[in-house]
Image: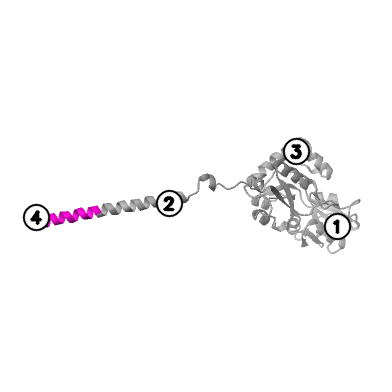
Amino acid sequence: MKKLIYLLLALSMTALLLVGCGSSTAAADDTGDAADTSAQEPAGEDTAAQSDMDYVKEKGVLVVGITEFEPMDYKDADGNWIGFDADMAKAFAESLGVDVEFTVIDWDNKILELDGKTIDCVWNGMTLTEDVLAAMECSNAYCNNAQVVIVPADKADQYQTVESLADLNFAVETGSAGEAEVSALNLSYTPVVDQATALMEVAAGTCDAAVIDSLMAAAMVGEGTGYADLTYTVGLNSEEYGVGFRKGSDLAEALNQFFATIYADGTMASLAETYGVQAALIEQ
């Protein structure tokens, strides 16, 4: 009997020791896993996303998405990009200590280009629409604008009201504010690559009319321009221009501060006068 009791006690002690060892091993394993996981997790500083400002400064160039759009972005006789927007973009890049590069984009794909980092901003007389504001981090507005109807000068008296436009076929830049306006009015239109092409379509007679930005119209149609036989008539809306960056970009606020500086010291007004857009400037 005593032997049986001793045997049972011995078995009980062995079981307890095994349970204890098992728990200890599991705890060690758990601790080891936790330690390994902790070691694999990068420090908080490393997980922080690189800011757009740092990204642009690191690569040393600000890539600006544009279309050919006089007086904002266009080429001089030597093939260099100039214009009110182009000159401001150059000055802003210089203030950041980087070079500037202008890239012609498909306007309809501007958000894809921006998010894909083939460009760093859209700076091309861009209307601050609800869609743009939702998809981009935008600067403060810096210019007033409107969408206006372009027609042959000898037919201008026939098209002085929105109602008179009903039977015309328009050329409009795809993805533009002009396209949005003619679409909202249920007018017939042909999408083209940019506003300069829209003017060419009207001049060639392949479209009856175009809708382009008023600032471009003032610079490119009428007496003394390359399109002396065209004129603008009906204004379809009023709008404002801004510059678009990737959503959440810190470059937008940096540009706002830059705008305030060059507005205060007269640089913005001087550039605007160079390109004939001074009346459209918005105080910064």
Which residue is drawn at the image coordinates 82% and 55% (left, top)?
149
- Of residues 194 and 24, the one nearer the viewer is 24
Q: What are the residue bounds of the magenta stretch? A: 1-17
Which amino acid does the dot numbered 2 rest on?
Asp
Q: Position of residue 92 (x, y in %)?
A: 72, 43
Quadrant in the picture for the N terminus: bottom left
Which amino acid does the dot numbered 3 rest on?
Ile
Please report whichever mark, 2 or 3, sits nearer to the chain's N-terminal start: 2
Residue extending farthest to the left is 1
Q: Give me the C-alpha separation between circle 2 and circle 4.
A: 51 Å
- Which residue is labeled 4 in the image? 2
The answer to which image quadrant residue 6 occupies is bottom left
Q: Do the residues bearing badges 2 and 3 touch, measured as CB atoms within 8 Å?
A: no
Please report whichever mark, 2 or 1, sits nearer to the chain's N-terminal start: 2
Query: Would residue 13 be visible to someone looking at this image?
Result: yes
Indicate which disc residue 151 carries: 1
Identify the element where label 2 is drawn: helix
- Which residue is labeled 3 in the image? 262
Q: Position of residue 188 (x, y in %)?
A: 78, 63
The answer to which image quadrant residue 263 occupies is top right
Number of numbered discs = 4
